Image: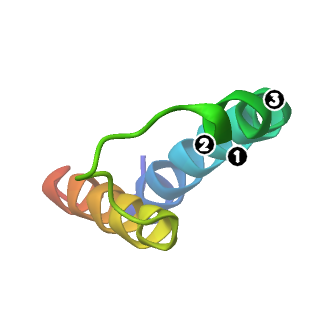
Amino acid sequence: MKPIFKLIISIAAPLIVGASSAYFTYPAVKGWYTTLVKPSFNPPNYLFGPVWTTLYGSAWQCGGI
C-alpha cells in the first residue's frame, strides 16, 4: 500500500469513528452530563475540544506517521 493511502486511512478512520459516536451519543449526553455534580478540579468546558484534539494528534504522531 502506498504511503499516501496509509496517511489518508490513518486520518479518516479516527475522524469517522469519532464523528459517528458523537452523532449517536450527543442527545443522551446533553441531558445527563449537565446534571452531574462535578469536582472542583473539573476543567472548564471550553478546554475539552482543544485538549482532546491535542491528545489525538499526539497519538497519531506517535503512530509513526
Q: Residue at x 60, y 42 (%)?
A: 18
Quarter residue 51 falls in: bottom left
- Tell us which disc is closer to us: 2 or 3: 3
Left or right: residue 61 compared with residue 29: left
* Callout 1 amino acid: Ala
Which residue occupies the foreground of this view, 47 or 24? 47
Q: Residue at x 42, y 66 (%)?
A: 44
Tell me the CA gap for discs 2 and 3: 10 Å
Q: Residues within 10 Å of mark 3 (few under 14, many from 20)?
A: few
Quarter residue 21 falls in: top right
* Callout 3 amino acid: Phe
Looking at the rendered structure, the secondary structure element under dot 2 is helix
Q: Which mark is residue 19?
A: 1
Instruction: Return the residue at label 3.
Output: 24
Instruction: Return the residue at label 2.
Output: 18
Q: Residues within 10 Å of mark 1 (few under 14, many from 20)?
A: few
